[in-house]
Image (cartoon, rainbow, N blue to C red):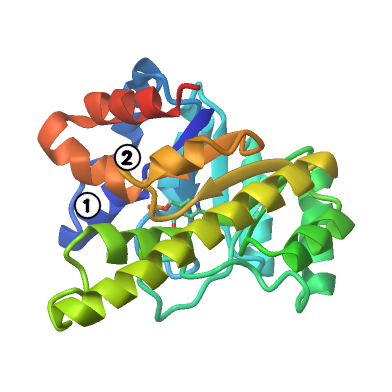
Amino acid sequence: MLLGVNIDHIAVLREARKVADPDPLDALGICKRAGADQITIHLREDRRHMQDMDAKHIIELSSLPVNLECAISAEMIDIACDLRPHRVTLVPEKREEVTTEGGLAVTGEQAKLKEAIQRLQNEEIEVSLFIDPTLETVNASLDLGVEWIEFHTGKYANIYAMLYTNLSKTHHSIQELELSRKSLKKMLNDELSNLHQLASEAKKLNLRVAAGHGLNMQNVKEIVKIESIEELNIGQSIIARSVYTGLEQAIIDMKDLLMR
Ligand code: PXP
C-alpha cells in the first residue's frame, strides 16, 4: 500500500514561532530515503501552516510525486494550475476548524467542482476528491470524472480513539463504559465494513482509492487490510512520533505496517 507523508505539521511547528525552522523542504530527502511514495501538503487559504513559497519549492524540488491539497476557490485553483503538482486533492476548508473535519460536499457544489476539476485536468494534473465514505459521495465523484477519491477516515479514527485510548472515558461509570464499549465496537466494525464495501465499489467503477485523516500506528492496521485502498496519506501521527524517533524512522515504521 502506498504512503503519502503529509508534511504540513512541520510547517505547523515553524509557524507556531514564526521562525525559519523547521523547514518542510528539508523533509523531502528524508521522506524519499525512508520509502515514502508521495509528499502531501495542504496550502490553506489562510496560509496558517504551509506558505506559497513552501508549496512552490516543494513541488519544484521533490523527486517524489507531490499531492497538493487545496480548497476549490478560484485563487487556490489558479495557484495549483500554476504550480502543476502531480495531483491536487480538493478538500473543504473552514477557517474556524483545527483540521479538515469532514469531506467535500460533492453533491452540493457540483458546478464549482466541475469547473475546478476541468481546469486542473486541462493542466494534466490528476484530481482527487476528499470525501466522507458514503455511496452518494462515491457516485457523485464518479460523475465528476476524477481519477481518485480519498476517504476521510476521521470517523473511524475517532471511534477507535474512544475505544482504545483514555480519551473521553474519565466521566463514565464502569457499567456505562461497558455498555458504551459494546456499542463503540459495533460502530467501529460498521465503519470498517462501510470502508471495505465502498472502496471495492469505487474500484469496480475504476476510481482509484486513497484514505486518510487521524490514522496512526495502531488504528492503521485494520485499514491496511482493505485491499481496494491503494494509498494512505498520513501526517500528524508520523510527525508527532518523529519527535522521538526522528522523521526517517517514523516513516520507515509506518511504511512497514503498510506492507501487505
Ligand atoms: N488527507 C487529507 C486530504 C487531509 O486533509 C489530511 C490532513 O487533515 C490528511 C490526509 C492527513 O491527516 P492526519 O494529519 O490526521 O494524518
Look at mark 2 in the image and give the residue it sits on.
Answer: 24
* Disc 1 to disc 2: CB gap under 8 Å: yes
Residue 76 x %, y %: 61, 61
Residue 239 visible in the current orientation: yes
- Residue neighbourhood size for the residue with mark 2, other residues' Cα within 10 Å, grouped as few (<14), some (14–19), many (≥20): many
Residue 260 x %, y %: 50, 22
The amino acid marked with disc number 2 is Pro
Look at mark 1 in the image and give the residue it sits on.
Answer: 14
Point 14% across, 83% down: residue: 171
Q: Secondary structure at mark 2?
A: helix
Point 35% across, 35% down: residue: 25
Camera-nearest residue between 104 and 59: 104
Quadrant hosting residue 135: bottom right
The answer to whether the beta carbon of the residue marked 1 is less than 8 Å from any atom of ligand 1 is no
Compared across the picture, whether 228 is left or right of 204 comes to: left
Q: Is residue 78 above or below residue 98?
A: above
| Cα–Cα gap, marks 1 and 2 | 9 Å
The amino acid marked with disc number 1 is Arg
Residue 255 x %, y %: 39, 26
